[in-house]
């Protein structure tokens, strides 16, 4: 199912759902960040997704990272919270989701790189390499917030 991101777009469709979600900045011992190329919109992104009933948000972050990248992670902090009502995701099935996401910081503790049905490519990147990758502004903002290292961002 295709997804279109609308951020600060006055012509964006009106949200009809609000779903808690997690994203994860996974950093290895060399300081590289783990990214996946999303199958639904073709751009690079952090691993992450919607929380399931019966799971905690940290469990969601670990599960989504494992499903989308093949890595098990240990959560080590919070990059920030992202709840901008002007940022919505429009899906082909008619759902228009307002963003509500907590972005965690993590390190890999097991597993190995693998693509999934949600990703077409998974790679480690040096922070400077990320600047030229195609990605939506909200993901770039999370990476910028992590690189800034000033503590959790509240957006």
Image: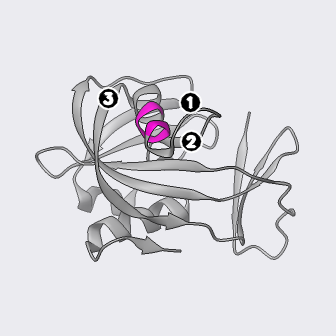
Residue 48, compared with residue 71, is above or below; it is: below
Instruction: First in sequence, mark 1 or 2: give its number.
Output: 2
Which residue is labeled 1 in the image? 118
Instruction: Tell me if mark 2 has few (under 14), some (14-19) or many (20+) residues whose alpha carbon lies within 10 angstroms of its own.
Output: some
Say which label, 1 or 3, has the lower sequence index.
Answer: 3
Question: In the drawing, does residue 66 fall left or right of residue 96?
Answer: left
> Residue 89: x percent and y percent?
72, 54
Residue 71 - label: 3
Tag nearer the camera, 1 or 3: 3
Q: Residue furthest front?
A: 54
Residue 150: say if magenta: no
Q: Position of residue 133 (x, y in %)?
A: 41, 55
Magenta residues, as a range?
A: 59-63
Residue, x 56% and y 23% (percent of image)? 117
- Estimate the spatial distance between the alpha carbons at disc 1 and disc 3, rounded to whole Å: 15 Å
Q: Does residue 134 appear in the picture of this structure?
A: no
Q: Main secondary structure of the magenta part?
A: helix
Helix, strand, or loop for circle 1?
loop
**Secondary element at tag 2:** strand
Residue 1 image-quadrant placement: top right
Say whether residue 30 is left or right of residue 25: left
Indicate which disc residue 16 carries.
none
């Amino acid at each position: 199912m295709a997804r279109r991101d609308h951020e600060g777009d006055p012509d964006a469709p009106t949200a009809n759902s609000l779903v808690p979600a997690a994203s994860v900045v996974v950093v290895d011992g060399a300081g590289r960040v783990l990214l996946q190329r999303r199958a639904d919109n073709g751009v690079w992104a952090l691993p992450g997704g919607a929380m399931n009933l019966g799971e905690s948000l940290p469990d969601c972050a670990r599960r989504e990272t494992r499903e989308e990248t093949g890595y098990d992670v240990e959560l080590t902090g919070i990059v920030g919270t992202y709840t901008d009502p002007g940022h919505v995701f429009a899906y082909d099935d008619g759902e228009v989701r307002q963003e509500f996401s907590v972005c965690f910081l993590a390190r890999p503790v097991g597993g190995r790189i693998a693509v999934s049905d949600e990703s077409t490519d998974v790679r480690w990147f040096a922070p400077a390499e990320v600047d030229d990758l195609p990605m939506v502004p909200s993901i770039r903002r999370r990476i910028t917030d992590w690189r800034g290292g000033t503590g959790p961002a509240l957006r």
